[in-house]
Amino acid sequence: GLLGLTACSGSDEAAPPPEAQPAQAERRVVRVETQVLEPTTFTEIVELTGDIETAFDAVLSAQTASTVEALTPLGRFVRKGDVVAELDDELARAAVEQARAAVEAALAQYDLAEDTFRRQEPLYRDSIISAIEFENVRTQRNQARAQLAQAQATLSQAEEQLQYTRITAPFAGTVEAHLVEIGEQVMPGTPVVRIVNTNQVKAVVGVPERYANDIEIGTPVEIGFKAYGMARRPHRVTFVGRVIDPQSRTFRVEIALDNPDGRLKPEMIAEVYLTRAVYEGRIVIPQTAVIRDENGVTVFVVDREGEQPVARRRTVALGPSYGGRVIVEDGLAAGDELIVVGQTKVTEGDAVEVVNRSNGLATN
């Protein structure tokens, strides 16, 4: 009946169209920037930090006990031998006068004893006076001579103490600091005045011992100062220490600098750049292109052999680095197209679209 009819008529109808197949998923394409590698020159530079020191810098101390009477004004230029501080010399002058009087008295005693000796000597030879009497005369003369020498030594010491009341500059320079006040009591060793000469200064650097073979007197360096915009200027090493500091594991290096305008000031920080080596014809890449992960030290390059450029991972061996660049010792060659932007977004075999492609790497 009806069921059979329905079934029969249903079998005569056309089958519904099959569901449309899903479109194949679009392949992932990563936008990158690349650099075609070329051999270049790479300069390995060691950056060091040092301080400016004056070639002539002295703290002058009192050498006698007294009171400060005068100080040369701060900032004044003085020549070698100029007085920069005066101490009260009243007691010192009195001591000199007393010592001079003692010398005069001792000299008179010696002259008398010498005259007596000369007069008694022929009498002794003629046996007019005894040996004991002549020996007493000789002894008196010798004692007078010793007393004169002692008095002269005391005078020299007194004159020296008087000289100490005038503190003089050991070299031409500028009065940088007063370390005492006028009226202050000082003792031997009390710092009084600081004198500096900044016409000739030096950059002093502690160089790590691993660079001991890279630096010697005459080694070229460049020096810059943050205070003056870091413009580098060429100089040469003038001193290399022979001893390693056991605490810092560094050795002292000095670079002499002319400073006629006084712009370089003591304790100013100097940035010193030492050229350690120059490498010719090397593959050099940005350090930012290097990836360090569980795969080791790698980079990505563009493989253009297929229809679509793809990213390929390369393991690399790196050499010296400086200024954000590093030498590749193994793993890359001239002509390779290195991914320098987007390398952290790609994986092995990803399709890439190169949106910016440059050639070579500038020499550093």
Image: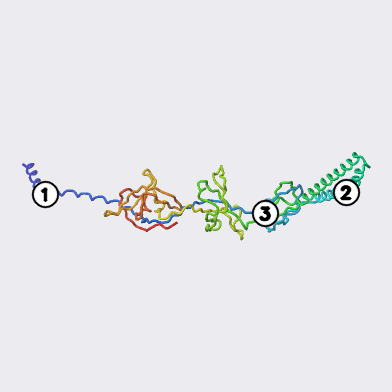
Residue at label 2?
Answer: 111
Instruction: Check residue 195 in the rendering and tell me which mark sits there, or answer none.
Output: 3
Ranked by sequence position, the earlier of labels 2 and 3 is: 2
Instruction: Check residue 14 in the rendering and tell me which mark sits there, or answer none.
Output: 1
- Which structural element holds mark 3? strand
- Which structural element holds mark 1? loop
Check disc 2 and give the amino acid type.
Asp
Check disc 3 and give the amino acid type.
Ile
Q: Position of residue 23 (x, y in %)?
A: 23, 51
Mark 2 in CB contact with mark 3 (< 8 angstroms): no
- Which structural element holds mark 2? helix
Q: Residue furthest bottom?
A: 261
Of the 4 image quadrants, the one containing the C terminus is bottom left
> How many residues crowd mark 3 within 10 Å: few (<14), some (14–19), many (20+)?
many
The span from disc 1 to disc 2 (Cα, nearest Å) is: 159 Å
Q: Residue furthest front?
A: 126
Q: Position of residue 207 (x, y in %)?
A: 53, 48
